[in-house]
Image (cartoon, rainbow, N blue to C red):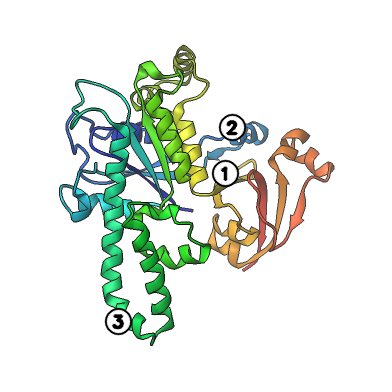
Amino acid sequence: MSLKVGIVGLPNVGKTTLYNAMTGLDMPVSNFPFTTIEPTVGAVSVPDERLDKLVKMYNPKKVVPASMEFVDIPGLGAGASKGEGLGNGFLVAVRESDALVHVVRCFKDEEVPLDGPLDPLKDIDSLNLELIFSDIDMIEKRIDKIQKKAQMKVDKESVIEYELLTKCHDFLVDMKPLRDLGLSKDEIKMLSSYAFLTLKPVLYVLNIDESEIGKEDSDVVKKIKEKAKEEGALAISISCKIEYEISRLEDEDKEMFLEELGLEKPGLNAVVKAAYDLLGLYTMFTCGDKDCHAWTFKKGMKAPQAAGCIHTDFEKGFIKAEIVSYEDLINAGSEKAAKEQNKFRLEGKEYLVNDGDVVHFRFNL
């Protein structure tokens, strides 16, 4: 399952530093606006302690963690919704993303320029306004094309589309994102082809100073987290610079550095986990002596659909799924013991696959 998470934000907020830390790449970073001028895509492994334990149990020749694609998107400047600056490249890349990681600058650094005083809440509003303006522009162009047909009521689908777009337009002009509108599943499905920017789920990554790590949230960070909660979004505070340094260390040095900072795990783990939650994703496993593989699938998928995330043939020719829960398998101590305890079961086409299921799909073509 290929899903993209776009990393967005104003210039000089730490987007590329975060991207480099997550992907292990080294895209250029410098203290002036628009260092990133083209979207860059990198795969990020999803940290999962369950996979580590399954690997110890099966001792496979190959290990494949679940992964997600993160996109480092050019910084946004005022007027991007009108195509100014790098706006067009920014907005196209945002529209192609399934969810957004909005990096917000909450640190002070004389070497990293600021356009005015540090004001994270204002920065959030600035970027959100550009996304809102872009959605309004798209809706107005579409309404112009279908308005006459809808008002004449000669085409039922045009009437439904016109009414829905008008409702969205009226909400957007109040400077509120579409994800706050409370659209039904059917309405969201109808709007899916538009890929509206303000309908995408958002994770705010609050890029704090190193000196703030492990301390109580500052007043501004608290306000942003409250704002995120009101929006139905998520918010995490990390130091992108420190996360980048941690990502470059060997495991032993990494543990020592984390201990010095008073952290149990890198903050990047929380970012990836939050992105998973935003997209409504679960993980299932296929295990054997050849390989242990973690697979991403959507919450609420039935067994054939989940099988299709491995290979389309698995879904087309689905017969049964042999399943054991991760907890039952680990508690049994081995696959053989789990089978002796009757923890494995056969499930059919209506089975809803659970997070952590260890599966073997039976299929025939």
Question: Which numbered mark, 2 or 3, is in the foreground of this view?
Answer: 3
Where residue 211 sits in the image (x, y, percent)?
37, 16
Mark 1 nearby-residue class (10 Å; few <14, some 14–19, many ≥20): many
Residue beneath the point at 34% across and 63% down = 169
Question: Could you give the CA–CA distance between mark 3 and mark 1, rounded to whole angstroms?
Answer: 54 Å
- Indicate left or right for 3 with 17 as reference: right
Q: State which tag comes first along the sequence, 2 or 3.
A: 2
Q: Secondary structure at mark 1?
A: strand
Q: Residue furthest right?
A: 341
Task: Examine the rendered structure and indicate whether residue 337 appears above or below residue 166.
Answer: above
Left or right, 110 with respect to 203, comes to left
Q: How many marks?
A: 3
In 3D space, how far apart are the residues under numbered discs 2 and 1 (Cα atoms)? 13 Å
**Crowd band around label 3 with a 10 angstrom C-alpha radius: few (<14), some (14–19), many (20+):** some
- Three-letter code for the amino acid on which mark 3 is drawn: Lys
Residue 148's disc number: 3
Q: Secondary structure at mark 2?
A: helix
Q: Earlier in the sequence, mark 2 or mark 1?
A: 2
Q: Which residue is mark 1?
A: 293
The residue to which callout 2 is attached is: 49
